[in-house]
Amino acid sequence: MNQNTTESAGAAETLADVPEHVLKGLPEEVRLFPSAVDKTRLGVWATKSILKGKKFGPFVGDKKKRSQVKNNVFMWEVYYPNLGWMCVDATDPRKGNWLRYVNWALSGKEQNLFPLEINRTIYYKTLKPIEPGQELLVWYNGEENPEIAAALEEERAAHRGKRNSPKAKKGKSRLSPPPSRRPRRGGNRSGARQQPAPRGCGETCKLLPSSGATAGLFRTERRCRSKYVGVTFPRLRCPLG
Ligand SMILES: C[S@+](CC[C@H](N)C(=O)[O-])C[C@H]1O[C@@H](n2cnc3c(N)ncnc32)[C@H](O)[C@@H]1O
């Protein structure tokens, strides 16, 4: 494998640059080919139909502090109450998996995947059926998109169902003290644990064009909401924070 990453090489990424484990880990319905949205990159293309609601992941990478990440294109930031913002960085293809090769859509209209955070792990879920010959493209937009809101709610319900399954309850009762003796750690009435807003964050974050990501990507102003642990949209990292 070529040791140069996209970041340092500047040259178009080719299949020869892709580590063996990435190719082996590709789901059967996708393959890597040059991207249509970024000529310098490979992209992930459907070779078979993919149903709406299919979840891929997790997004794999090195867990690092933000200050250790040189290139924000291949990373996701995740908030940990005890560690603060940490990054899952797949800039080095050897550290990532095939999800690293999913490119940003040029606009929300082309988006066929959305990112999903489940217990601080990033997954991508299909927002619509993807036909053979289409590139998989992710886009960051939130629950104001009714389709994403519905998909997220569906995922939450499935997650709640799993947590409340007899098997999960049995496991929990073996591992933890009864609820009356369990310390309450910042839980609210609904049981959702609130996370503090990132330091320096105002009520609203203005998202900046993502440096290094697909040209022309501008994000709109969004609320920087404090999210609970569980299934959520990746929490927004306040660029001012
Ligand atoms: C892995 S994702 C998209 C990668 C895709 N391969 C591309 O073409 O850029 C990386 C992008 O998500 C942004 N990002 C990372 N964590 C985020 C978060 N928690 N909320 C919103 N955007 C985030 C980064 O700034 C970066 O632009």
Image (tube, rainbow, N blue to C red):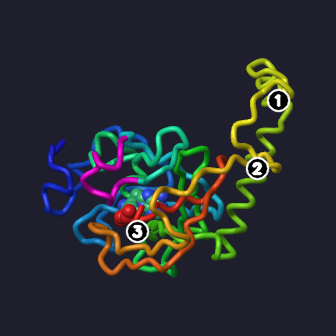
Query: Does the segment drawn in magenta span residue 53?
Result: no
Foreground residue among 142 and 96: 142
Q: Does the residue labelled 3 lie within 8 Å of ligand 1?
A: yes
Q: Where is residue 232 in the image (x, y as percent from the top left)?
A: 63, 56
Mark earlier in primary sequence (2, 1): 2
Q: Which residue is drawn at 55% across and 64% down?
A: 114
| Measured Cα–Cα span from mark 2 to mark 1 | 15 Å
Side of 4 relative to 190 (left or right)? left
Mark earlier in primary sequence (3, 1): 3
Quadrant for the N terminus in the image? top left
Q: In this view, does 76 lie above or below 163?
A: below
Judge the density around disc 2: few (<14), some (14-19), many (≥20) Cα neighbours within 10 Å: few
Magenta span: 64-75
Mark 1 lies on residue: 169
Side of 58 relative to 162 (left or right)? left
Q: Which amino acid type corresponds to the residue marked 1 in the rendered image?
A: Lys
Task: Check residue 104 in the rendering and tell me which mark sits there, or answer none.
Answer: 3
Task: Check residue 158 in the rendering and tell me which mark sits there, or answer none.
Answer: 2
Q: In this view, does 239 lie above or below 7?
A: below
Q: Does the residue labelled 1 lie within 8 Å of ligand 1?
A: no
Mark earlier in primary sequence (3, 2): 3
